Amino acid sequence: MNWRIGMADGWRRLHTKGTVIVSGALAVVTACGPAIVEAWNSMPPDLKTLLPQGVQRWAALAAFLLIIVVRYTAVRRKGDTPAQKEAQQ
């Protein structure tokens, strides 16, 4: 079986896709993970008690749902059809 790895179709315009933007934003959050943990650990205990319990779980769920929404939706100008968009490319 021969496999060939190459660039994705339309790779020059991938930076405009919602999934790429969201993935990049979540990669930045992941890269800042140690700083976020440090900030959480340096937070006073009385301030931590003001936050709702399970806020970490809800934030992860919101990020997951955001990825699903961005992945399976598209924003187009009024009147544009997928056939017209392909013709422009």
Image (tube, grey):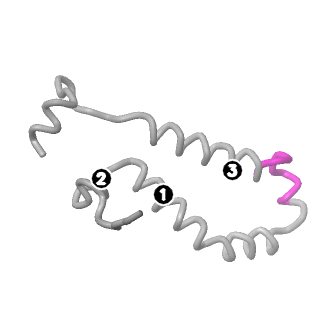
Give the SS element for disc 1. Answer: helix
Q: Look at mark 1 in the image and give the residue it sits on.
A: 23
Region rendered in magenta: 47-55
Q: CA distance from mark 1 to mark 3?
A: 14 Å
Q: Residue at x 21, y 25 (%)?
A: 78
Give the SS element for disc 2. Answer: helix
Please tell me which of labels 1 and 3 falls first in the chain. 1
Please, is residue 9 above or below residue 6 in the view? above
- State the image coordinates of residue 75 (x, y, percent, origin top left): 32, 34
Label ID, residue 60: 3
| Most foreground residue, 38 or 58 | 58
| Most foreground residue, 9 or 41 | 9
- State the image coordinates of residue 37 (x, y, percent, origin top left): 74, 71
Q: Residue at x 73, y 45 (%)?
A: 58
Q: Which amino acid type is shown beneath numbered disc 1?
A: Ser
Q: Quadrant of the N terminus?
A: bottom left
Q: Residue at x 45, y 42 (%)?
A: 71
Q: Look at mark 2 in the image and give the residue it sits on.
A: 16
Quarter of the view holding residue 66:
top right
Task: Check residue 19 for magenta coloring.
Answer: no
Label ID, residue 47: none
